[in-house]
Image: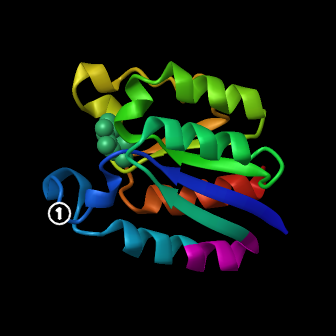
Amino acid sequence: MKKVIIINGPNLNMLGKREQDIYGKTTLKDIEKECQAEAKKLKLRLDFFQSNDEAEIIDVIHNSKNKYNSIIINAAAYTHTSIAIMDALLAVQLPVVEVHLSNIYKREEFRHTSYISKVAVGTICGFGTVSYKLALQAVSAL
Ligand code: DQA
């Protein structure tokens, strides 16, 4: 059975309350439930993690090395700024699928740069919570 971790970055714990016009009404807990159901269908073992702390995210990536077959990450705002998270992903050499709820390429210019894209197998963005399920299908097919 393939083991996968979904890592969520800063402010995603505020989903459901935060900028509903962009991110919708679904909470991160709801997304986790939907992802667990999808993972079951795909016969994946899934862990789900969120942190607002860059260092904590980096530690979880480092610890993924011998625990998971692939990483799905919504690094949120760190997507556009964090060379450190990109380097951590490079260090563990696991296949990475990048996810975003919103289409970052349709939004402000500063969101068009993604350090995660530089090291990901592929990126899924713009489909709201469905982006996460598509990412699980992608890692299952890898
Ligand atoms: C996001 C897009 C990022 O630009 C933003 O900073 C987020 C959420 C998304 O899922 O659409 O916090 O990663």
Name the quadrant of the N terminus.
bottom right
Tally of marks: 1
Q: Is residue 103 visible?
A: no
Q: Is residue 46 left or right of residue 99?
A: right
Residue at screen point 22% across, 26% down: 108
Q: Is residue 78 visible?
A: yes
Ligand 1's quadrant is: top left
Q: Which residue is mark 1?
A: 17
Q: Is residue 33 left or right of residue 111?
A: right
Q: Nearer the viewer, residue 77 or 130?
A: 77
Q: Which residues are magenta?
A: 36-44
Q: Is residue 15 magenta?
A: no
Q: Is residue 37 magenta?
A: yes
Q: Position of residue 73 (x, y in %)?
A: 54, 46
Residue at screen point 35% across, 23% down: 112
For mark 1, give the secondary structure: loop
Q: Position of residue 113 (x, y in %)?
A: 40, 20
